[in-house]
Image (cartoon, grey):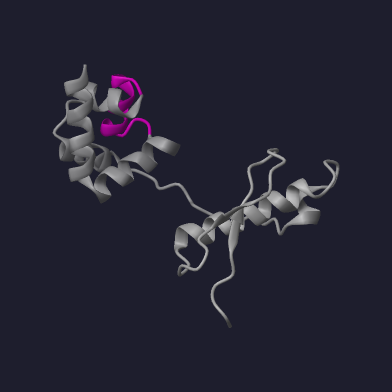
Amino acid sequence: MAGTPKRSVKKVGSGRKPKPVNSGRQSSVGSEIVDRLTRFVQTLESNPAETPLAALVTVRTLKRSMPLPTCTSEEVRSTRQLLGASQAIFAQFLGVSASAVQDWEQGHKPPRGSACRLMHEIRHDPDYWRKRLAALIESE
């Protein structure tokens, strides 16, 4: 092949001719992204507005099962202690009431949903979350 083909970028709705980009140079990731996005925009602009997107491009929906973790009262307490936080501060950090954290730690009610997910993430990387909590406390 005799050299790299010229690539062009077109402003949406500009009515101008495409501007040459990356002519003669080796392809980079950035220029490849620009090229593919340009072709995508050109495909959309060259078809009637009533044409469904799925008829023009490949549309995929990916579904992934991500079961919610469960938390025991011991895990709630140990997670809070990892952060070095009181029940009140930990509750504010999680966006729940202090009485909820107290109920969880005493085993009266289990934490659910996003609270368990966040506590799982805290146990996975406690140093990061200690820094985040400290930054939030300092900003007030």
Expressed as whole percent of the image width and height from the top left, the position of residue 38 reads: 63, 53
At which x and y percent is residue 82?
17, 40
Q: In this rendering, is residue 34 above or below 89?
A: below
The magenta stretch spans residue 102 = yes
Residue 3 to residue 75: above or below:
below
**In magenta segment, residue 12:** no
Residue 1, quarter of picture:
bottom right
Residue 11 sits above or below residue 36 on the image: above
Residue at 35% x, 24% y is 96
Instruction: Give the left or right position of residue 123, taking residue 25 as reference.
Output: left
Q: Residue at x 33, y 29 (%)?
A: 94
Name the residue rendered at 32%, 46% in the picture: 120
**Magenta-tinted stretch:** 96-109
Q: Main secondary structure of the magenta part?
A: helix
Pick the quarter of the image with the C terminus: top left
- For this rendering, which residue is in front, 67 or 59? 59
Instruction: Residue 95 in the image: state x and y as whole percent.
Output: 35, 25
